[in-house]
Amino acid sequence: MTDPHHPPKSALVISAHAADFVWRAGGAIALHAAMGWKVTVVCLSFGERGESAKLWKQPGMTLDRVKAARRAEAERAAVALGVHDLICFDLGDYPLQMDRADKDRLVDVMRDVDPAFMLSHSSYDPYNADHMMTTQIVLECRSTAQAWGHKPGGKVLGAPQLYLFEPHQTEQMGWKPDTFLDITPVWDRKRAAIECMEGQEHLWDFYTRVAQNRANHFTRNSGGQSGGRACKYAEGFQSVFPRTVDML
């Protein structure tokens, strides 16, 4: 039973396409969900045009059928990870486009969720303009959500950290992780969510290897080989804003 004096903490993940939240932040989602957090995931699109090649190779495939398949995959993955709420904007992809009303809708979500932190894409991604634009819009909407003059009288967003999850071609993105999260306890949930993404089966083992590589970095940075904490699977993140601490 929820304590009304200590409501569950919340987090918000903004994903350009239906599968992005799984590959890049599935462990963080599952780990926090297991701790009782309410994790909301926003999928701005289903990745139906640009990230569904396997489906498009099937004879007679249509846009609506691809979208339906990718939506179903995202819904199954969300259940596997323990997502509290999956919100699909269905804005289309390649290119992903957002007008003022779409942005205001995202602002409303930010205020409603009131997250302790948010997760989204790397700031730079020359391979995928949808990813790059998503993060710029997230930053824009974060600022708007903090503005007292936007829908006066409503709840104003605080200052949640924005973590940028790992892009696909990491070395090309200028992405530099400063935070590593041990996701070993929930790896089975992330792998199950990964396998829900049947439209991109070629990435299943790739992102398993990424998690194993980041586990090595977690161990090294938690004290080195002589005293580091053992870790089998991890995710890396880059924080955008300074963090306020009482001790190091």
Image (tube, grey):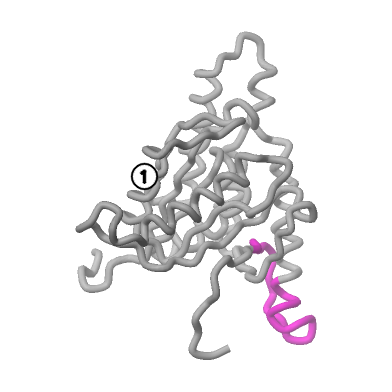
Q: Is residue 125 left or right of residue 142?
A: right
What segment carries the magenta color?
A: 218-236
Give yes or no for residue 164 being in the magenta stretch: no
Identified at 72% across, 75% down, the residue is 219
Identified at 39% across, 55% down, the residue is 144
Q: Quadrant of the N terminus?
A: bottom left
Q: Quadrant of residue 103?
A: top left
Task: Indicate the amino acid at tag 1.
Answer: Asp
Q: Nearer the viewer, residue 210 or 137?
A: 137
Q: Position of residue 29 (x, y in %)?
A: 50, 56
Q: Quadrant of the C terminus?
A: bottom right
Would you call the spot at circle 1 few (<14 residues within 10 Å), some (14-19), or many (20 or more)? Answer: some
Q: Position of residue 23 (x, y in %)?
A: 62, 48
Q: Position of residue 19 (x, y in %)?
A: 58, 40
Mark 1 element type = helix
Q: Which residue extends farthest top? A: 60
Residue where numbered disc 1 is placed: 104
Q: Is residue 110 visible?
A: yes
Give yes or no for residue 225 being in the magenta stretch: yes
Q: Is residue 4 left or right of residue 33?
A: left
Identified at 47% across, 45% down, the residue is 78
Q: Is residue 193 visible?
A: no
Q: Nearer the viewer, residue 226 or 115?
A: 115
